[in-house]
Image (spheres, helix red, strand yellow):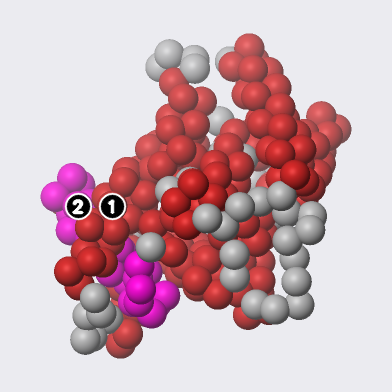
Amino acid sequence: MWPNRPVLLLVLSALLWSLGGVLIKSIEWNPLAIAGSRSLIAVLLLTAMFPGAWCRFSPGIGASAAAYAGTVTSFVLATKLTSAANAIFLQYTAPVYIALLSPILLQERTRGSDWFFVGWALLGVGTFFLDRFSPGGLWGMGFALLSGLFFGSFIISLRSQRESSPESAILYGNLLTVLLGLPFMWPPSHLATNWPWLVALGVFQLTLPYVLYANAIRHVRALDAALITFIEPVLNPLWVTLINHEAPTSWGLLGGALVLSATATRSILLARGN
């Protein structure tokens, strides 16, 4: 494999994921219905792309599927209940969980330089939203924090099964998300205006980036993967600012510069290491 290809796949995944905030906020519907509907689209697509994925199942795949479902469901809830900025910031606490758990679960040593880049990136994300936190939306903040925990667990679970089937984990994870959202999906709300956003969510923001991500993560360390995808928390609020007029402040510009510089620097070092 070309050495830089996994890095490029992870960057593309982050770009597609970054559309989540603006697409979710553009849909007037129950957040669990949104999560279930976009995962239903993903199930149909993944079944067509990987028909044999249904035949592969193991306890490890089940754990990955549960972590995946927790990630995507709690993130939609968080984005609807609080600002997109708050939701994406707290989801990106995932590298902290990875740095703590990888030495135990994956036998991957967390180096001093790793902690440096994690701290650098988290400082940037924190600065990006420094003056946006408020006592309101506590449920949304809680779901966002839960999304970070699930996201870290998903990364570690996939990383521990390098020779397994990530497509199966993602397929079963989407099925579980559909089941969680099913009671809230009927009757459909504002279908004429919502369906284009739902299709975009299911195809371009959910299915494609997770497939790219799951394949790329086989070739990089879990912590490296999380650091590269720090591009998402910068672009997610940017799209929301442009489309939904939920603008970050001047602190956001400083935070964005810190996050992008940490991501770019670590990505260059990773590419050179390969």
Occupied quadrant, residue 273: top right
Which x, y percent locates residue 3? 49, 15
Magenta segment range? 27-50
**Nearer to us in this view, 234 or 43:** 234
- Say if 252 sits above or below 56 in the image: above
Can see residue 99? no
Mark 2 is surrounded, within 10 Å at the Cα level, by few (under 14), some (14 to 19) or many (20 or more) other residues, namely: some
Q: Nearer the viewer, mark 2 or mark 1?
A: 1
Q: Which residue is mark 1?
A: 200
Q: Residue at x 65, y 24 (%)?
A: 264
- Using the image, tell me which numbered label, if any, was put on residue 45: 2
Q: Quadrant of the C terminus?
A: top right
| Position of residue 202 in the picture relative to residue 99 (left or right) | left
Q: Would you identify the image quadrant in which residue 33 lies?
A: bottom left
The residues tagged by marks 2 and 1 sit, at their Cα atoms, a distance apart of: 13 Å
Residue 147 image position (x, y, % from top left): 58, 64
Q: Nearer the viewer, residue 24 or 216?
A: 24
- For residue 42: magenta? yes
| Nearer to us in this view, 157 or 253 | 253
Q: Earlier in the sequence, mark 2 or mark 1?
A: 2
Give x and y (percent) for residue 6: 47, 26
